[in-house]
Image: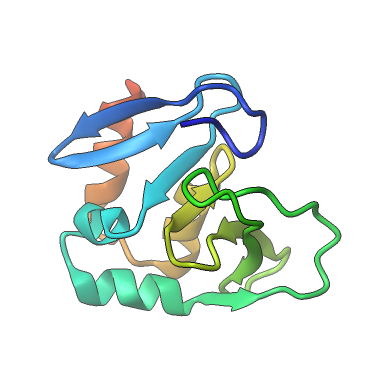
């Protein structure tokens, strides 16, 4: 699968039964449909996270192609904090694209990971120190 941002081949990283497609070049992360639920290990928390997303029809950012269906993804705003955080979501529901650092920002803004479970998985997956 190729990165929707820089078009380089992505690698699949797996930890705790969660597969994340990661671009080693730009640091972006692709989560297939269902992987967010696996990261949270709680479908309700994943649903609450997705409910934080609102379509941004005025975004000046160029739409990226979904790495699954190759259709243009929609830009969605996460949460209500300023400055706004935009991520990409497949219109057909194939998954979510996070530029480098955006997934961690989503978790922090939504306060949906109080036990830092997901941050620990990501830190282990990417070889980062837990903070």
Residue 16 place in picture, x, y as percent: 13, 39
Q: Of residues 23 and 78, which is closer to you in this image? A: 23
State left or right for residue 40 relative to residue 69. Answer: left
Q: Is 117 placed left or right of 65 in the picture?
A: left
Residue 80 can be seen, yes or no:
no
Percent across and percent down for residue 110 are: 44, 68
Residue 98 seen in the current view:
yes
* 61 versus 80 height, above or below: above
Residue 33: x %, y % from top left = 34, 59
Query: Observer-nearest residue: 8 or 28?
Result: 8
Instruction: Point out the image quarter for the C terminus.
Output: top left
Q: Is residue 10 left or right of residue 116?
A: right
Image height check: is 9 above or below 5?
A: above
Task: Indicate the quadrant where residue 130 lies.
Answer: top left
Instruction: From the top left corner, tell me how far across and down residue 9 is, in percent.
Output: 51, 22
Q: Nearer the viewer, residue 90 or 82?
A: 90
How many circles with numbers are drawn on the protein? 0
Q: Residue at x 43, y 56 (%)?
A: 95
Vertically, is 78 above or below 24?
A: below
Q: How is the image coloured?
A: rainbow
Q: Residue at x 30, y 69 (%)?
A: 46
């Amino acid at each position: 699968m190729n990165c929707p941002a820089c078009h380089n081949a992505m690698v699949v990283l797996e930890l705790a039964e969660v597969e994340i497609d990661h671009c080693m070049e730009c640091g972006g992360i692709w989560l297939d449909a269902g992987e967010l639920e696996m990261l949270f290990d709680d479908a309700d928390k994943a649903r609450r996270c997705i409910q934080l997303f609102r379509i941004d029809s005025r975004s000046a950012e160029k739409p990226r192609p979904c790495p699954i269906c190759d259709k243009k993804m929609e830009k969605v705003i996460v949460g209500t904090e300023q400055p706004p955080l935009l991520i990409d979501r497949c219109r057909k529901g194939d998954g979510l694209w996070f530029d480098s650092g955006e997934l961690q920002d989503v978790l922090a803004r939504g306060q949906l990971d109080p036990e830092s479970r997901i941050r620990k998985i990501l830190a282990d997956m990417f070889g980062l120190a837990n903070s």
